[in-house]
Amino acid sequence: MGSLLFNLKYVAKHPEFVLQYLARVNSLSSLMGEKRLCVKNYLKEYTKINADIELKLKKLPYLGYMNKRKNEVLYALVRISKPEIVVETGVGAGVSSTIILRAMELNGVGRLYSIDAGLRCFDGIILPPNKPIGFIIPQNLKGRWKLIVGYSKDVLEPLLKELNQIDLFFHDSEHSYENMMYEYETAWKYLKKGGYLVSDNIEWNNAFGEFIKAKSGKVIGKRFYSLGIMRKLKD
């Protein structure tokens, strides 16, 4: 009873959080054609995974990873769509990679190919000194993971040609207009019908919106804060 009263008081005090949560549920449900209850269950499931990740990051500086709300959307997307082949650009500490791999583990299917240039900043953001790319990824998840070190302009298309077709592409590398457009266009050619193209930091420029406009009738897109997700309807 005490817990219920606390929750009711919290909702009354912060109604905007409830509205944002319901918006995430409804948007994912309509984008994926999945029941809202299923979406809610996966968002709830992510809470424990997020706690484990935050514990690992507790003593580290902010490393440029996505926030909890965007991470839970990415997690639910992978849990619901159950992709066999995922390609991501931009790894850093490996927060998003861990989320994708954990979802794949619970799905019982999937392999993640990650591209990262291994960049380091002077203030320790992106990769701290003496830490490898993806250093927070648990060892027991690495059986589904392959890291390709290099710039996406050099290694993305060769990887996609080798894979032939992918189920999900996630952009989180250099957020310049030119690089985002290059990655979108390149990944699109290998993305299966019904597959998903996900991009972080879409507010940095107009690439995401312009790409959807250029593919009018071939894609549906949703925005979750600064995370964009589009579903490929046809080539």
Image: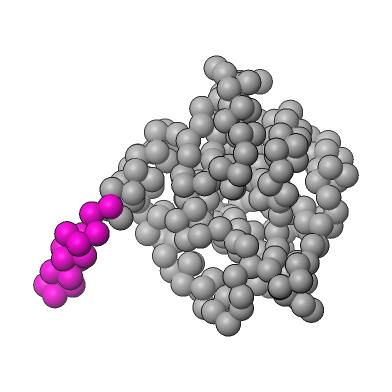
Residue 1: x and y, percent?
11, 72
**In-image side of 229 versus 9 (left or right):** right
- Pick the quarter of the image with the C terminus: top right
Image vertical order of residue 98 relative to residue 89, above or below: below
Say how the picture is coloured.
Answer: one colour
Residue 182: x and y, percent?
76, 35
Image vertical order of residue 143 relative to residue 178, above or below: below
Residue 114: x and y, percent?
74, 54
Asked whether 104 or 170 is in front, the reply is: 170
Q: Quadrant of residue 35?
A: top left
Asked whether 75 or 154 is in front, the reply is: 154
Give me the residue at 40% from left, 55% from top.
Answer: 43
**Residue 117 in view (yes/no):** yes
Give me the residue at 63% from left, 21% from top.
Answer: 214
Residue 50: x and y, percent?
48, 67
Give me the residue at 46% from left, 47% from top.
Answer: 225
Asked whether 78 or 124 is in front, the reply is: 124
Span highlighted in magenta in the image: 1-16
Give me the residue at 49% from left, 53% from top.
Answer: 70
Asked whether 228 or 165 is in front, the reply is: 228
Outermost residue on the bottom side: it is 59
Outermost residue on the top side: it is 217
Image vertical order of residue 19 relative to residue 181, above or below: below
By secondary structure, the bulk of the magenta-drawn segment is best described as: helix
Tell me, yes or no, whether the highlighted magenta stretch contains residue 96: no
**Residue 37 in view (yes/no):** no
Tell me, yes or no, whether the highlighted magenta stretch contains residue 5: yes
Q: Quadrant of residue 154?
A: top right
